[in-house]
Amino acid sequence: MTGASTQSSEMGNDAPAFLSRWEADRWLPGYQQCTAYFMQTDDEGQVIATFVRKNPQTLLPDAQWRRFARTVLRRSPAAILYVHGWNDHFYRRHASEFWEKMGVHFYAVDLPKFGRSYRSGQTPGYTEDLHGYFPVLDALRDLIVKECGPRVKILAIGHSMGGLVASLWMHHRQPHHVTALMLNSPWLELQLTRFGRWLTTPVVRGVTMMGGKTAMPLNDPGFYSRTLYKSQGGLWNYERYQLPDDVQFQPRAGWMNAIYNGQDEVAKGLDIRVPVLVCTSDRSMLQTRWDPLMARADTVLDVQSVRQAAVNLGPFVTLVTIPGALHDISMSAPDARREYFRIGLEWAGLLAWGSYRVSRHAERAALDAVCAADGNEGWATSDSETSRGADPDQTSGDGDENTADDSNTSNHNGDVVQGISVKLEGDTLNYNNHEDIENSSQT
């Protein structure tokens, strides 16, 4: 794509003034990035965001064929719009490559002042209004439609803070072409629970009035990083963006007030009119002393509070609990990671993209590969090795074509929520309509 000024009729003056060409990504080999420059400014300069995708020229043959089958034979491309969390950016190559192997176009954003979008002199991750991210997500949505065509069906995925942002975006914008929302441990409620948020709101707002960029005294013992990165005892070798030594990510009063406002909107009830999948761990471990069991728990959020808040997102919500999952479920131990991607694929195939099928062999190969990933260059098993003999793509067929092998026994719990529920019987996800909220499991 050549650099050009872009303008969407829906976005109006919120559209980026300039969108750069795709160029080699600075961090991920085989990926590309482009920069969106917006008309909006704040006291730290112009609003800038970065979009990331896999270089189409590096796609393996099976992924290219599935893209072709979905786009040309079915005339309905499938795509993902991914939004990262706090103190975060896009680097999860294993997640992107799983979806790409399924023929899905994967796009991610580094929000303003995060990762690739950070500029010298800015306050990392700072915003005073989560709604300010909406033009960025609108622009990425428009780019996906431009590149994939007007029949594309987009699944929005948000992790942690990105899950809160994506939920608010879906409620306020009702974005066209976005057919479903998948949330990975979304930050829908404060760790202190809703009551704790009510108690602390006057304090946060008072400090914000004195200076929005005032750092808040919140201690991070570093347990979550310890569960993730191999250098600290975790599973992953990813190299992440490093800020200059004199710059730090810190929770600040204005940013916390923005989070509180967003969570208050959720508590009052949103109207997301597409299917929503909310995935969480089965347990939280929010404590001040290290415990090895933290490697199989959410050490960032109170999952019970998140699940309670999730029922306020809209009329079509599915809750799934994945035992042994970390805060970022996609980076959990292999068993929990496999469940997350398998459930996400089957759910999105039915509710986001419409009867999207791949062969059992191809699905199993992709799940094996994502479970073997550890952040090193490439996957442990090449595409040609894992998919030899696979049927490249099944664009129609019965439910058996979309199930995993019989050895993959699921142990997750599904909750029934108003509108649509997911229940696992054997290895097949079944979807049923319900009028009332009913919990079938507890966390």
Image: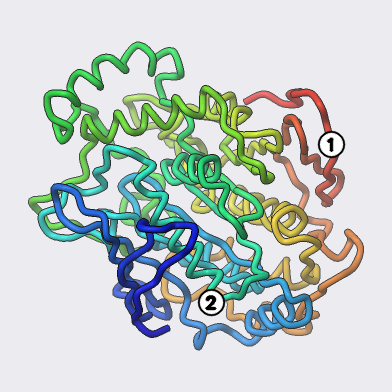
Vertical side of 153 occupied by 324: above or below? above
Q: Quadrant of residue 418?
A: top right
- Quadrant housing residue 193: top left
Q: Which mark is residue 147?
A: 2
Residue 226 in view, yes or no: no
- In the image: residue 180, left or right of residue 97: right
The relative height of residue 217 versus residue 225 in the rendered view (above or below) is above
Q: Could you tell me residue 162's position as x and y percent?
A: 44, 46
CA distance for labels 2 and 1:
35 Å
| Residue appearing at x 34%, y 74% in the figure | 5
Nearer to me, 376 or 42: 42
Density class for disc 1 (Cα within 10 Å; few <14, some 14-19, many ≥20) is few
Marking on residue 433 = 1
Which of labels 2 and 1 is toward the front? 2
Give the label on residue 221, or none.
Answer: none
Is 271 or 240 nearer to us in this picture?
271
x, y percent for residue 284: 49, 29
Does residue 339 appear left or right of residue 260 in this picture?
right
